[in-house]
Amino acid sequence: AVLRRSLSYAIADAGRAVGVLVRQIGGVRTLRDHPGSGRDPLVPTDAATQRKALDLIAHNVLSIDGLAVTPTLQRRLAPDFEDRSDNPALPTDYPVPQRLLDLQRAVLNQLMSDAVAARILDSVGKAERPENAFQLAELYSRLNRDIWSELAKGGNISATRRELQRDHLNRIANSLFRPNPAARADARSLLRMQAVQLQVQLDKALKRGGPMDAATRAHLQDSADTLSQALSARLYR
């Protein structure tokens, strides 16, 4: 029971830390200075800070080994008998993969939101050197690379990784098939480009063959079919 509570606290702490990092991507700081301070009231987060925050998120949340709990620890997360007597609805199993996936989904929900895309696009125009500003293409390309890193290596993909990849894929497909009228045109164009590149990667992985279990092959085939349908479907406006 102590391990169970400690792991819950650890996941919650990780979620709060990631929440701070996610806000740096496309972040804009508002300064409420007195008149005459000489400072601009709207200060977009500098590109270096955004790239560092994205790097931390990619390595610690979205990578293969970013969020991992050993099988030995997962087998020891049974509830205490007294806790069960006080709360009969307390489940016996502790769904570690689902808890970690919920955290990853929350990160994706923020990073791939229309609001963050709009802020990143607008921040480029506020920069003294737009060519050095953090670009939306960087964000989408990094997400594609880290979430689908197994495609370049080959082999099997774990069930938890397949869930994360499917969630990322669905967000891209939905943005193409049912675009938000309020979404920026550049954001949709970049997502379409990412969809095309990802489809090429999926096709190469399927043609490469090699050791691959049935679940992985079905996942890759279904993902490729989903992207193909999204790219060729008529838009609902």
Image (cartoon, rainbow, N blue to C red):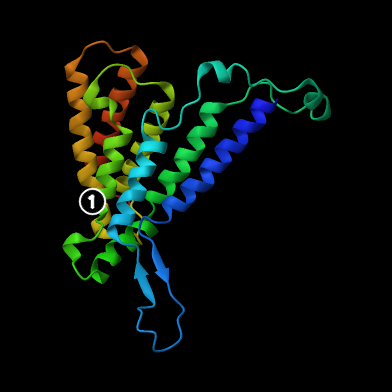
Q: Residue at x 43, y 75 (%)?
A: 31
Q: Quadrant of residue 213?
A: top left
Q: Is residue 23 left or right of residue 198?
A: right
Q: Residue at x 19, y 26 (%)?
A: 203
- Looking at the image, which is closer to me, 129 or 94? 129
Q: Is residue 121 left or right of residue 13?
A: left
Q: Which residue is mark 1?
A: 137
- Looking at the image, which is closer to me, 60 or 149? 60
| Percent x, y of residue 43 | 35, 70
Quadrant position of the N terminus in the picture: top right
Mark 1 Cα-neighbour bin, 10 Å: few <14, some 14–19, many ≥20? some
Compared with residue 221, is residue 231 higher up or lower down, i.e. above or below? below
Compared with residue 123, is residue 70 higher up or lower down, i.e. above or below? above
Q: Quadrant of residue 135?
A: bottom left
Compared with residue 125, is residue 65 higher up or lower down, i.e. above or below? above
Compared with residue 223, is residue 214 higher up or lower down, i.e. above or below? above
In the rendered image, is residue 237 in sight?
no
In the rendered image, is residue 38 in sight?
yes
| Percent x, y of residue 200 | 17, 32
| Percent x, y of residue 102 | 51, 37
| Percent x, y of residue 223 | 30, 29
Tag 1 secondary structure: helix
Q: Residue furthest bottom?
A: 36
Quadrant position of the C terminus in the picture: bottom left
Q: Is residue 203 left or right of residue 67?
A: left
What amino acid is at disc 1?
Ala
- Looking at the image, which is closer to me, 171 or 128? 128
Q: Residue at x 62, y 25 (%)?
A: 94
